[in-house]
Amino acid sequence: MQKNPFTLPFDKLPVTIPVFPLEGAVVMPGTELPLNIFEPRYLHMVFDVLAIHRMLGMVQPAVAELRQSAPTLSATGCAGRVKWFSETDDGRILIVLRGVCRFDVGEELATTRPYRKVVAEWQRFATDYEELDTALPERNHIVALLRTYSKTLGLDIAWDELSKLSGTRLINWLATSLPLTPTDKQSLIEAVRLVDRAQILSALLEMYIARPQGASATRH
């Protein structure tokens, strides 16, 4: 793994982390997620993390509780570091979050801040620091499926740039970027090993390709 001088070592990751529950918004290690922050509680969150370790956790809410003000969080999310931010004249903050490491959501903490904060249990995902440049034996099969999938959905993919990604970075980028359902994205987040994420992604692409055009993409 190529070391980023601004990324905390695994054994220095924070014990607690603020979380941003947002359906379908996924960041995986080594990928980047642009976010448009406008709610006051999350503006507070961004300003707070910029003053310390710059890290926040993206965690999808439980699908059945999307309309609740404080929905139950999914069991696993991914922490990212604010790589870039810019203020807008209308009171928003645009940020780019770079994925660092996944975590299991532990105890939710009482806080006087307007956003939610949890204990981050990192141990199960120590390999996120080790496998970012791992090769992928079934890469050609996944890329072939991706070409059919992208043609079916009319997606524009930069194939030359994609060919430069390692196996792990490829799978993580697809988990972050493809228009999969929140449930499908969550299954990829929770799969610890690269081989398991690759198998899940292959099965998902095959399923989407086989689905009749115009059929609903909603899965719970």
Image: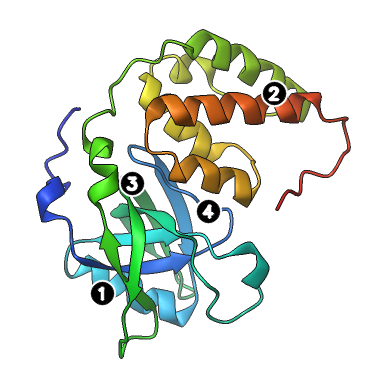
Q: Are marks 1 and 3 in contact (CB under 8 Å)?
A: no
Q: Which residue is mark 1?
A: 48
Q: Nearer the viewer, mark 2 or mark 3?
A: 2
Answer few, some or many: residues within 10 Å of disc 1's Cα (few below 14, many 20 plus, some between 14 and 19): some
Q: Nearer the viewer, mark 1 or mark 2?
A: 2
The Cα atoms of the two marked residues, 4 and 3, are separated by: 13 Å
Q: Residue at x 18, y 70 (%)?
A: 51
The Cα atoms of the two marked residues, 4 and 1, are separated by: 21 Å
Q: Is residue 156 visible?
A: no
Q: Earlier in the sequence, mark 4 or mark 3?
A: 4
Q: Are marks 4 and 3 in contact (CB under 8 Å)?
A: no
Local secondary structure at mark 1 = helix
Q: Residue at x 32, y 52 (%)?
A: 80
Answer few, some or many: residues within 10 Å of disc 2's Cα (few below 14, many 20 plus, some between 14 and 19): some
Q: Is residue 218 visible?
A: yes
The kind of residue on which mark 1 rests is Asp
The Cα atoms of the two marked residues, 4 and 2, are separated by: 22 Å
Q: Are marks 4 and 2 in contact (CB under 8 Å)?
A: no
Q: Earlier in the sequence, mark 1 or mark 3?
A: 1
Q: Which residue is mark 4?
A: 25
The Cα atoms of the two marked residues, 2 and 3, are separated by: 29 Å
Q: Could you say where residue 184 lies in the image, as x and y percent from the top left?
A: 61, 43
Residue 216, quarter of picture: top right
Q: Which residue is mark 2?
A: 206
Q: Is residue 111 left or right of residue 88?
A: left
Local secondary structure at mark 4 = loop
The kind of residue on which mark 2 rests is Glu
Q: Which residue is mark 3?
A: 98
The kind of residue on which mark 4 rests is Ala
Q: Could you say where residue 106 lies in the image, as x and y percent from the top left?
A: 33, 67
